[in-house]
Image: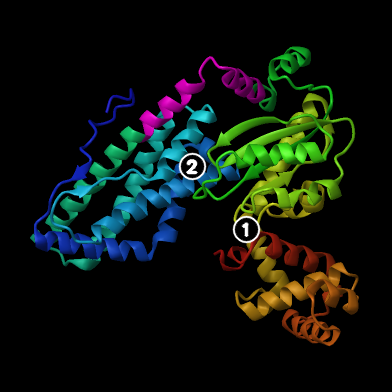
């Protein structure tokens, strides 16, 4: 591979054949490694972001990186687990290619791809070798197994990196010198706070920066194939708010940034009313409406914060507004402290069980409805007496009346509601 970053020559599209005994042992290691896949991917994500912070710039970047890391681990391990003795095909995952397109569209230096893959490779290989030591005792056979795992890992990474860099280069060349490239560069200058003449930037963007701006971040799971649906959704929302066609910038295959220029704040009810016209897998974060170039930046930052808050949660189409979730987003900025706050505030009510989840949701709505049982029952489509029983049980698990620390209790319940059960199991 000739990439200018000291990479090795790319391997062929297959890994070398193995004798039957060694293929069986590699399969045993692969099965063992897959058991701890989630933890391994989380370690890779954190290590790559530490090395290349641009990969963790926002929830969309993190999701793209994590999907690529997961696929680049799961695909070879699944193939190795088949225990095939002949040459094993190396198939580049679509998630890895999508990650390359994200890098290209965001203007990240391509050397970051190489650095990120090598850091991830080292962590994955360390995990594989730990598994191998558990499978085979020390001796000549273990040494053969370790060499085979190292060779196959390097073959996989070398081939995938070569293909990923090629796709990233093609993606960047496709937009170099185009109106899309000029638009992307102008938007990045604005978001970076660089000095820029508003009238000139407005002309280049075809978008009036002197107006009031409402930012949108639209995204869907990286594994989905919703071609053109993000742009369509942004247009639907802009039309509902009375704005001209939105200014948009693709931030990756599954993330779109958009701005709606309006004279007044968009009506929330009108945005919600058109949600059924949007693909059901799409999620939408809506920033606050702000004026001028400074507002262009701040509304976008706010929408990104909401995307970060909701990115791990299922659902879609219904817009999520920053003004509704600002406090929750601020409280969730430090995941470790947020998890500790939830555990200490909710006590036994923070258990990761279906019963506890039902009690938390009932208490959350009950407090939101000013402790009005009939209104709570109507929102949750259940009987008033059921609500009162659940609230009593929730109060018992809290070891105090909810009103004793009402603000803290409401915030903890809202954090779990918005972020999900992973907040309860975080250690």
Span colored in magenta: 164-188
Q: Quadrant of residue 13?
A: top left
Residue 313 shows which numbered tag? Answer: 1
First-in-chain label (1 vs 2): 2
Q: Give the x, y percent position of residue 171.
A: 46, 27
Label 1 sits on a secondary structure element that is: loop
Can the viewer see residue 144 in this picture?
yes
Q: Is residue 114 left or right of residue 28?
A: right
Q: Is residue 253 left or right of residue 48?
A: right
Does residue 185 belong to the magenta stretch?
yes
| Rendered position, 362 above or below 4 | below
Does residue 108 belong to the magenta stretch?
no
User: Is disc 1 surrounded by few (<14), some (14 to 19) or many (20+) residues within 10 Å?
Assistant: some
Quarter holding the C terminus is: bottom right
Q: Give the x, y percent position of residue 267.
A: 87, 44
Residue 272 shows which numbered tag? Answer: none
| Rendered position, 5 above or below 142 | above
Q: Is residue 179 left or right of residue 300?
A: left
Q: Give the x, y percent position of residue 31.
A: 29, 65
Quarter holding the N terminus is: top left
């Amino acid at each position: 591979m000739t990439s200018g970053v000291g990479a090795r020559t790319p391997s062929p599209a297959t890994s070398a054949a193995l004798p039957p005994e060694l293929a069986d042992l590699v399969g045993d290691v692969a099965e063992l490694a897959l058991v701890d896949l989630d933890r391994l991917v989380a370690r890779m994500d954190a290590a790559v972001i530490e090395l290349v912070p641009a990969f963790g710039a926002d929830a969309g970047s993190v999701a793209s990186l994590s999907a690529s890391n997961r696929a680049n681990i799961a695909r070879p391990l699944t193939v190795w687990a088949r225990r095939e003795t002949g040459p094993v095909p190396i198939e580049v995952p679509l998630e890895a290619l999508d990650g390359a397109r994200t890098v290209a569209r965001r203007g990240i230096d391509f050397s970051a791809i190489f650095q990120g893959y090598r850091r991830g490779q080292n962590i994955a290989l360390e995990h594989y070798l730990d598994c191998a030591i558990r499978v085979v005792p020390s001796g000549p056979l273990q040494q053969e197994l370790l060499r085979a795992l190292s060779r196959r890992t390097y073959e996989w990474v070398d081939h995938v990196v070569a293909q990923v860099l090629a796709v990233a280069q093609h993606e960047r060349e496709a937009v170099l010198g185009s109106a899309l490239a000029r638009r992307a560069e102008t938007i990045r200058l604005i978001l970076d706070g660089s000095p820029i003449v508003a009238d000139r930037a407005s002309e280049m963007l075809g978008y009036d920066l002197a107006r009031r701006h409402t930012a949108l971040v639209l995204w869907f799971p990286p594994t989905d194939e919703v071609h053109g649906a993000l742009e369509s959704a942004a247009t639907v929302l802009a039309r509902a708010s009375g704005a001209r066609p939105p200014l948009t910038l693709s931030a990756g295959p599954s993330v779109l940034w958009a701005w709606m220029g309006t004279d007044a704040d968009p009506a929330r009810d009108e945005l919600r009313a058109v949600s059924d016209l949007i693909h059901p897998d799409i999620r939408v974060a809506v920033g606050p409406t702000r004026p001028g170039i400074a507002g262009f930046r701040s509304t976008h930052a706010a929408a990104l914060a909401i995307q970060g808050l909701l990115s791990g949660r299922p659902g879609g189409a219904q817009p999520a507004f920053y003004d509704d979730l600002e406090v929750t987003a601020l409280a969730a900025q430090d995941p470790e402290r947020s998890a500790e706050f939830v555990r200490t505030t909710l006590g036994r009510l923070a258990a990761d069980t279906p019963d506890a989840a039902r009690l938390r949701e009932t208490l959350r709505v009950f407090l939101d409805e000013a402790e009005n049982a009939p209104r709570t029952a109507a929102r949750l489509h259940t009987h008033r007496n059921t609500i009162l029983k659940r609230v009593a049980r929730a109060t018992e698990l809290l070891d105090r009346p909810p009103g004793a620390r009402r603000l803290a209790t409401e915030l903890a319940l809202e954090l779990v509601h918005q972020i999900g059960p992973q907040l309860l199991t975080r250690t």
